[in-house]
Every structure is written in C-alpha cells, then in structure tokens.
Image (cartoon, coloured by chain):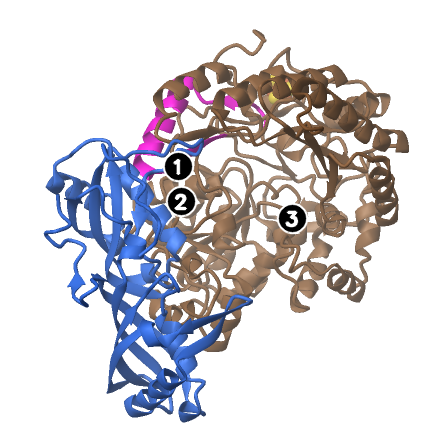
Chain colours: A brown, B blue
Amino acid sequence: MRLARKDRFSELEPLLGKVLHPARYLDHEWGATEEQDGPFHACLIYPDTYEVGQPNLGIAILYNELNRAEGISCERAYLPWVDMSALMRERGVPLLSLESSSPVASFDLVGITLAHELVATNVIETLDLAGIAVRSSDRDEDDAIVVAGGASAWNVEPLAPIFDAVSLGDGEEAIVDIARCVRSCRERGLARAEILRELSRVENVYVPSLYDIVHDETSTRWGYAVPKEGTGVPPVVYKRCIPSLAETDPIPQRMVPYMGIVQDRLAIEVLRGCARGCRFCQAGMTYRPVRERPASQVIDAVCEGLSVTGYDECSLSSLSTTDHSQCEHILRELKMRANQNGVRISIPSQRLDSFGVDMASAVSGGRKGGLTFAPEAGTQRLRDVINKNVTEEDLYRAARNAFENGWKRMKLYYMMGLPTETDEDILAITETARKVLAIGREVCGYRRGKSGVSVSISVAVFVPKCYTPFQWQGQLGRDEVRRRQQLLLQSAQDRDIRISYHDSDSSVLDAALSKMGRAGFEVVMEAWKRGCRFDAWTDQFSYETWLEAGRSVGIDLEEVAAETFDLDARLPWDHTSPGVSKGYLKREWRRAVQGVTTPDCTMTSCVGCGVCPTLGVDNVIAGDRHAR
Amino acid sequence: MPGRPPIGKPDLERLRVRFIKNDRLAYLGHLEVINTISRSVRRAKMPFSVGNGFAQRMRIQFSQALPVGAASTCEYYDLYLTERVDEGEAFELLRASTPKAMAPTEAHFVKSKLPALEAWLTRSDWDIRLFGRDFDASALGLALEDLKGIGKIDFMRGDKPRSIGLDSTLVSWALEDCEKEGEWDCVHMTLKTRSSNLGALRPAVLLEAAFKTPVLAGAMLDSTRVLRQGQWNEAEDGSLIDPFDPGQLL
Ligand code: SF4
C-alpha cells in the first residue's frame, strides 16, 4: 500500500536512545542533498546497515545523477539493525528514507543495490519493513516501482519475483532513464502492467515478469527464461556500458558520514573494468572493457574531493588500480599535491609484482602495516588453470622488495576448492609461505633472536559464479573442504605463519544462490520467514536454518552448490548478459583444464571475449600499458 | 588537578571554540563528534598543526565527552594553529564548514599554557526532561535523596561493573512536574554535577539508579531529553571560571 509522504522522524526519535549506534539513523550528513522537492521521488536502498552501505560508490553515483535530473529527487535508505527493526515493528514505524524521513513506501521509485548474493533475505526484510509487498505481482497499482541493480545482478533469478525491473551494467545513465520512464508513465496514467512493459523498452532493463521459465532437455533443472508471448521483449538483455569514464563525475562521493563506516575515506574511481582474465573472477568478466580515468582528472578530483569533504584519506578505487597506465605519475603528483597534513592516499589491492610494491611504497609514507598479495593458488599449475598470470618468481621478488622497503607483515590470499585442485596445491600454499618467511628473515635479520617477520594466509572457499569460465562447475563439498583445511593447518608448523579461513558454510549458501534459477526464490522467502537476515554477518548467519528452509521447499542447498552443469546446457542466467560470449567462456574453460593461460587484452591484443563488438565499446587506456 | 597535558607547542596558536550539539546530532558519540569536527576544520582550511607521529594527527583537544543522546549548548575544543589568523574570520570559516547542529558559537585565542580542557572543565549544568509512567517530581526527589544517602552508585558500563561516589559529583538538583507529553508523564529537572579524576556523573546513570530505588518501584522511565547548558572550571574557592574568562584569553 502506498503510504503518505511526510516527515516521520518524530516517531523514530524516541527509539534512538534504545538502540546500538543511533548515528546509523540520523542523516543530515555534510554533503547530503537536503532539497527534496521532487515532484518525482526516488529512494536508493543498500539492504544492509548504514556503515556497510554508505561507502558504496555505486549508490553515490546514482544518487547524484538522479538529484541532478530535472524534476527528480533522490534519497537513501539502509536496513536498520535488528534491534531497531524490532522496535519499529513494535511501534508501527515503517522503514523511512534518510533525507526527509518519509516512508519508503511513499516513493515513486525504489532502487535496491545487490552488492553480493548474501543480501537476499535483507532485500525481503527491507521491503517488508517498508510495508511494500515483497512480490512484484502482489503490488498495488500505485505502489512504488521496485528496481534492482548492482554487482550481483547477473544471476538475479532467485530474487526475480521481487523486482519490477532490473538495471544491468553501468547505472549512471540507466537510472535516470528508468526514473523518467516511470514518471512519464505515471503522468500518462498508465496501469502498472503497462509501466513494466514500457520499462522493458528502456535499454538494458530486464523485466522478470515478462519472461517465462521453460524446462526442457536443453536446460538445467532450473530451466531458462524466454520472452512471454506477445511482449516483444528481447531474448537477451545486455548490460549498459558507458564508453568512457572521463565524461562521468569524478567525485560522486561528497557526503561525509558522522559515524565510522567500513571505508571511511574519500574514494575516487580511477578505472572501471579489468581485463587480466582471472577465470574465477566475476567482476573481471562483467565490468569489461577497461576504461581508465585520465591522470589529470584523477589528480584534480583527489585534491578537490579532499578539500570539500575534509577527509584525511583518499582511496584510488578500482578492480586493479596499479594497472592504470598512468599510476606512477598519479601517485607521484599526489604525493606532491595532496600528501600533506596527515592526508593518506591508499590503493585497495596490490599487484603481485615489484611494481605493485613500488606503488604501495609510494603511498605508504612511513607507515608500514601489512602488505597484501593474492596469489590465489598454491602451485604454478593451478595458477595457470585460473589464469592468474603471476609466477612463483614474481611473488618472491615482490616479497623481497617489500621486506627491503620496510614491511614485515605479509598477508597472502588464497582460494580453496578451485577446479582441478589437488592436495599438492594445498601443501604448496604453506611451502610458499615458508619461502616468503625465509626471505623476510634473511632481509630483516634477527634482533634478540626475533625477526619480527610474519606471514598470514587467508583462505576463502571458491564459489563458482555465473559469467566466468568456471560457471558450469560445482563447488567443492563441505566435508572435502574441511579435510583440505585440516591438511593445510597441519602443514604449517612455523608460528610466524598464521592461517585463517572464511566461513565455509556461508560460501555454500553463496554458491547455491549463485546457481539457482527462479524457483530458488521460495528458499529465500522461507529462510526469511524463519528469521534469516544479515546473512553476511557471521553472528547472524544460521546455516542450519537455511538448510531447513531449503528442505521445506524440496531444495537441498548443499546439493545445489555442488551441482555441475553441462557445458551445452541453457543456463538460468543466459538472458541477462554482460556481453561476454558463451563461446569465449567455454574456450577459457577448456584452456583452464589444459593449464593454458590467456593474456590481458589491454597489454597485448583482443582475446575475443565478445564484450566490445557486442556492446559497441572499446578499452580506453589513458597512457600506454605496453610500456611495462 | 592532574590531567592530560596540552598538546600544543609554545609557538602554536591555541584557538578555543565553543560549539553546540543539538537536534539529531545529539545522538552522536564522542568519537563521532571528534571526527566530524576534525573534518570541519579541514574543510575550513584552518592552518592546523599536526602531531609528529606517523599518523600526523590534527592537534585538537576536546572538553569532556557528552553522553550519546545528550544535546548541549556549550561544548568546547582547543585547536592548535601554526599561525595566527583573524579570530572573526576563523570563526566564520568554521561556521560555514560545520554541520548546523554542531555550529560554533564563539571562538577566541587563549593562552597557550593553559591545562587541557577535558580535565579542567569540572562543573556541568544539565537541563533534563524525563518521560515515563507513574512518577512525579516529588517521588523522584525522594529517590535522589535516598541515593545521596547511600553515597554511591554501582552500575554497569557495557559488561564492566563500575562505581561512582556521589558526595563530590552530585552537586544539586531541582525538580518540577510538567505537562504530559502524549501518553507520557513528564518531569523537568535541573542538575549540577562535578567531575574529578575519579570520574564524572552521567545523568543517565543517576536517573537509572533513581528508578531502581524502592520509592520509584513500579514507575517506568521511557526516555529522557538531556541538555548540557553550562561547563566551567571550579576554582579552589568554589567560584566558577568560564572557558572564555578574560584570564584565559590571549
Ligand atoms: S572484446 Fe577484446 S578488447 Fe574488448 S574486452 Fe574483450 S578481449 Fe578485451
């Protein structure tokens, strides 16, 4: 039911003294758009707590674009923590937007970000708390149009019954098109069904209710989606892809939160996309092609951004910042122009070579915390399988360089359960750690019998994701994961080598949600009814409840996670495409099995992933990547 | 009184700023206040001084933490600058770059050798409204007398047991009944507290203890609206010194 638009903060305020971190619910941050005159009102929601959602660059970008558009206002909302939502339900307060404290159910358009698979139950919780029907088909004529988008929208099927529409790919232009379409439909008095039909005509927008799920001998057990007869919708909806970053606002994040958030710093997006071609990496496949922001724009944006926000740290964010062809120049300039008065520049991940260490060195100043590398797999054989184009020598050289530059703590990220993995690959992880430790001890020497050098290994369980060359693979079973974890633990006998694991149970759920088709929605709904929410928070996650929810609707989640699909099967997500061709993914799978690597197209030449010709775009490299 | 020493070097200029904390921002914690003010100072492009450590922290010191949920008309910070700037101009720049609900209300340069604000400001005045059921000013007054008689409050901060003596920290109070607000009974209280290096008495701790006394058995406190409306240093002769007292100013 559509609620009236009015400020209801006075109903929330008495609750603030009773909950953890009341700053989550305050709004009025520096830089927030206070004018919310509409007349068309959109609300963007990150379905997790404020401190997790506020740093999301995607929402910041869309928020500004919508607020800039004539006649459209945009606000934000986050999912209240369990203490607050319990009180809100008790006192009949619905989910409110931050800026005007209006009920989310009073908005014309509600946009929900899907940052990862484990937000599934939070999406339902968000809508339920807002008082908006969870299923698109149950909404009233004048209810908000609920749209999704984001990094994990590529297999949106397990949540498809929720959304009126899904925006695929880059959202900065698409969200404004969507808002304008809904506004014009409302002005023309169109019925809800007609509005959805109109939305399906907006480029790169997928309207799930206009597709049927078909099961036949060519499909997996989840079936595949085909346009409903007479709808005229495209059989495959491709992603929106902005051709160049240079035309986008380089400082979308001008809002300064009051409370400490997970990435409490200014973030400037220096490039979008990564073409290194790691075969497990969904982002690497779905954000192609690579579009670099020119160095001068990055440098000016960092300086201006720091000045308008008052932040003392700026992160140069992207999937692979040190791959920017002008990275060295950018960091050198920033050191001169911005690196004063306690201001820090940070780069989110290091390239696994000496250049990466040099760049980390350039931004670290005197501070030498831990340095993180991601070899991902223990042996060269397995690194070739996953196309992680680094050698053992690269790693040792980088480690030596890092120790010589003053670092003492090294963190190495690995994955367990990668296709073709054997015990030998597992044991090689500790072998590598031992060698890195030995290099560190040799470089740093000993003082009073201690070198101070340590290596920590962090191991995640591999989750096969759609639109990667590993999309057909099943996840390694839980028992086997446990056995390999034990094997690894027992092999590390130096107390300066520490091993930690990510929660393998939530990886099973992640894998199942990544694989399921539309029928998977029943599991998500059932899990939410049984109390599941905040599944990405280890203290809230209940594996057992999820398994029971699955069983109650006849779905065995462990079996789903471990299921392998036939290479020729029609997949549940074939109709929502980032432009990467299936032929390329199959070829990459075959090369993986043979241990043959594929180069980065920004360093060599096109390797035929299909994105550029399909979407009519190209890599945009500001300088010269061949130079290295 | 022992306390944290000032962090400025003698050659730095010490700008003392009084600011408010009200509306929604009353719900900010102390760390959030510090971060917000520090960012405002950076936005105002003040020539602030930074510490020598790797972290190069801004040299700034705040008055005692205000409890989460409490508003105030009189919080203070001392900001150390590398150069003397025009006082009025600095005030305007800070005002323009600070959220309205934390706006500065006065700023002056003070002597560099003064003690740090946190320990020096020993007296606070509070204006409190209590909302709940089945209590009034006289019952609350009796409960407070009882507590004063016991002389201390044992309470929990998180999962740690704490204790605060009342002989020195609870200076005085006044109570009056006021109009019901919605479904809630309402009592208006003014409270004077004193802090020392042994601790400060938080209004919420006092009120929670009061509602646990037998006099208020059966009464329920739903929420409070707390405003700090004055902070001073209490001199040995009992007189109260304002942070902008002429003796403090440069
Ligand atoms: S189409 Fe070719 S150039 Fe474009 S991203 Fe794919 S591999 Fe690279």
- Could you tell me if residue A617 is visible in this image? no
Q: Does the CB distance between marks 2 and 3 fall below 8 Å?
A: no
Label 2 and label 1: CA atoms lie apart by: 9 Å
* Of A564 and A463, the residue lying toward us: A463
Which badge, 3 or 1, is on the more N-terminal residue?
A: 3
Please give left or right for residue A42 compared with residue A402 in the image: left
Please give left or right for residue A160 compared with residue B130 in the image: right
Quarter of the image for residue A601 reads top right
Quarter of the image for residue A77 reads bottom left
Q: Does the CB distance between marks 2 and 1 fall below 8 Å?
A: yes
Kindly state the secondary structure of the residue where label 2 is placed: helix
**Looking at numbered disc 2 in the image, what kind of residue is underneath it?**
Tyr
Determine whether the beta carbon of the residue marked 1 sits less than 8 angstroms from the nearest atom of ligand 1: no
The percent position of residue B42, horizontal first and vertical second, equals: 30, 37
Please give left or right for residue A571 compared with residue B240 in the image: right
Where residue A252 is drawn, which disc sits there? 1
Q: Do discs 3 and 1 belong to a common subunit?
A: yes
Q: Quadrant of the N terminus of chain B?
A: bottom left
The percent position of residue B81, horizontal first and vertical second, equals: 24, 35
**Looking at numbered disc 1 in the image, what kind of residue is underneath it?**
Pro
Q: Which residues are magenta?
A: A288-316
**Looking at numbered disc 3 in the image, what kind of residue is underneath it?**
Glu
Using the image, name the chain to which the residue with label 3 belongs: A
Please give left or right for residue B42 compared with residue A123 in the image: left
The percent position of residue B106, horizontal first and vertical second, equals: 15, 51
The residue that disc 2 covers is A63
The residue that disc 3 covers is A117
Magenta region includes residue A194: no
Label 3 and label 1: CA atoms lie apart by: 25 Å
> How many circles with numbers are drawn on the protein?
3
The percent position of residue B125, horizontal first and vertical second, equals: 24, 69
Using the image, name the chain to which the residue with label 2 belongs: A
